[in-house]
Image (cartoon, coloured by chain):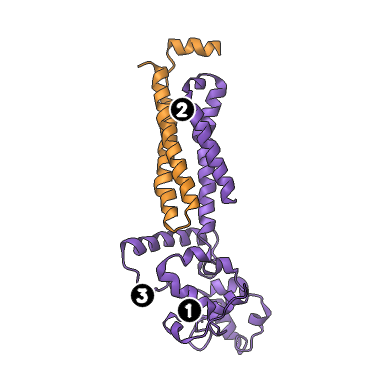
Amino acid sequence: MPTVVVLVLLALTVIFIGIIIARPEITAARGGKVLAFLALFIFPVFGGLLGLENHIERSKQTSFCLSCHVMGDYGRSLLVDDSSYIPAAHYQNNRVPRDEACYTCHTDYTLYSGAVKAKLHGLKHLYVQYLGTPPHPIKLYSPYNNRECLHCHLGARSFEQGAVHTADAQTMADIKSNKLSCVSSGCHDTVHNVTQLDHVKYWKPVQ
Amino acid sequence: MTQTSFITKKLRTAGLLVIAGLIVEALSLVWNHPLSFVAFMGIGGLLMAAGILWYLWALVSYRPDAGDAKSAAKN
């Protein structure tokens, strides 16, 4: 839901509540009671839920993630002019939506819990950012799960028929069961690689 | 204090709390910053929840007195 629609709903609710505050005697009549119930219960709850949804959607944006200083290098790594950098190759070739690049690869593609878990982690990040000391470099909570890659790549010809993936039946089975990580050494092992960002060339997007 | 003035006061307090919560929530929606979510939930959400609970409490604790019953009958 666009932010402006939520703001209009919140403004209307404030106006209705203003009427109740200015003339509380109208609540003696049935119409006034209904207005009070709508203004002081239904509209605020509905507006609050829409606002929450708006915040959650906004927190998926790449610009939102990169607004924290500690994420700056990770944002730079999306523009590295080297296709062996996995995030850069995905970002520059639209394999992930550019405006939700971080979220697309770093949310858990599990039923229901992905967005909620990401939000809870986000609150922890805020705590560390403002009340603690962010680690450098930052680390994932758990090893990167192939599930996040397979969410898109499973069934894709390049994955299913890739020469290395199909070298033997066990390799494919291990990838799909997350026993063999996609980002293992020797496979797709150049990820953000932020310690090397001063020694690489950068791609300049065409405006 | 009559029941009418009792509920009037409660409605005003609830209304002010909800308005304060809504204003904080609206401001958080136009503030593009990670802390805006904390403001939305931690300040706006709390104020709004307090206002709504205050309103609901006013409803359940309201006992119409004789004067109220007469005016309700007129309406």
Q: Can you give x and y, in whole percent of width and height, for residue A33 in the image?
A: 53, 24
Helix, strand or loop for disc 3: loop
Residue of label 1? A192
Residue of label 3? A136
First in residue order: circle 1 vs circle 2: 2
Colour seen for chain B: orange
Which amino acid, mark 2? Ile
Picture disc at residue A141: none
Which amino acid, mark 3? His
| Whether residue A94 is situated above or below residue B48 in the rendered picture | below
- Residue toward you, B20 or A167: B20
Q: Can you give x and y, in whole percent of width and height, for residue A52 in the image?
A: 50, 50
Work out whether residue A191 can be spotted: yes
Helix, strand or loop for disc 1: loop
First in residue order: circle 2 vs circle 3: 2
| Whether residue B58 is situated above or below residue A115 in the rendered picture | above
Q: In purple, which chain?
A: A
Helix, strand or loop for disc 2: helix
> Circle 3 marks a residue in which chain?
A
Task: Name the front one of labels 2 and 3.
Answer: 2
**Number of marks in the image?**
3
